[in-house]
Amino acid sequence: MKKIYLILIVTFFITSCDNNVMLSDNNIVPSDNEVSDKKISTQDSIEISNVVHGFYNWYSKEINEKHSKGFKPEIIKTAEGMSTLFLDNYLNNLRKNGFSQVLIEKEKESYQPCISELNKIKFKDLDTLDLYQIKKIKCDFGNNYRWGGGQEGIDGIKIHSCQKKIDTAIVVGEFYNQYGEEYHFWGRNQEIVLIQVDSTWKILNFK
């Protein structure tokens, strides 16, 4: 019986874009001050849910693997012996896991201050930097989980609601950690904004 119960819960997390197990054309929970101009169809609800769950399934797996580097940029040595950031693998992983090109470009730009400072530091001297110095040069991305959890890891996200407005959708979800067959929910919401690009839903922003 316990195994059947676990399977039902996991299926609920993966397939639903609303707080109800049954999907319908009424899967909208408007905010107090705003009503969406379109109802979310069953197909959109499923696709949006798949994008959000797909990203967090990948992300939670990456951050929980001991030697994984795919969820963040990597500091590497240049031919001249200086330091820089290698972003290609990280950005490609975001692209493969539902990020829009707009968000990828924004993410790439956010690391430029760090790259500028790293270019002034010899690679062999990196180990001499303390946490304060790393933060000062805006390269402290390794001290927290950028897309959820802060300094604590997550095991996934449960979607509570979706709200569609023209070609964007706002998903409200809640992070959780899993301990055996039990789920511990964080008690605070995470908003994810998606945009429809060529009939495909992509992640546009996190709030």
Image: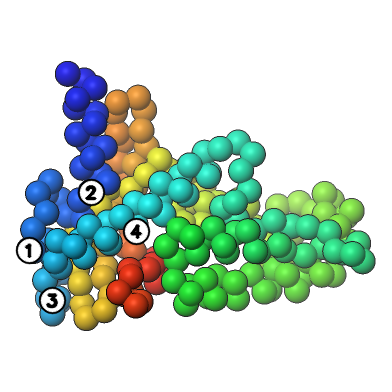
Q: Residues within 10 Å of mark 1 (few under 14, many from 20)?
A: few
Marks 3 and 4, how far apart in space? Answer: 20 Å
Q: Position of residue 5 (x, y in %)?
A: 19, 27
Q: Residues within 10 Å of mark 2 (few under 14, many from 20)?
A: some
Residue found 67% across the figure and 74% down from its top: 112
Marks 4 and 1, how far apart in space? Answer: 20 Å
Q: Which quarter of the figure is the N terminus placed in?
A: top left
- Please tell me which of labels 4 and 1 falls first in the chain: 1
Q: Residues within 10 Å of mark 3 (few under 14, many from 20)?
A: some
- For residue 179, side relative to residue 173 (left or right): right
Corner quadrant of residue 43: bottom left
Amino acid type at circle 3 is Lys
Amino acid type at circle 1 is Asn
Disc 4 target residue: 51
**The residue positioned farthest toward the top in the image shown:** 1
Please state which of the two labelled residues, at mark 3 or mark 2, is closer to the viewer: 2
Check contact, mark 3 vs mark 4: CB within 8 A.
Answer: no
Amino acid type at circle 4 is Val
- Dot 1 falls on a residue whose secondary structure is loop
Question: Which is nearer the eye, 185 or 108?
Answer: 108
Q: Position of residue 9 (x, y in %)?
A: 22, 36
- Dot 4 falls on a residue whose secondary structure is helix
Disc 3 target residue: 38
Residue found 42% across the figure and 43% down from its top: 154
- Dot 3 falls on a residue whose secondary structure is loop
Disc 2 target residue: 15
Check contact, mark 3 vs mark 1: CB within 8 A.
Answer: no
- Dot 2 falls on a residue whose secondary structure is helix
- For residue 84, side relative to residue 92 (left or right): right
Residue found 39% across the figure and 67% down from its top: 203
Amino acid type at circle 2 is Thr
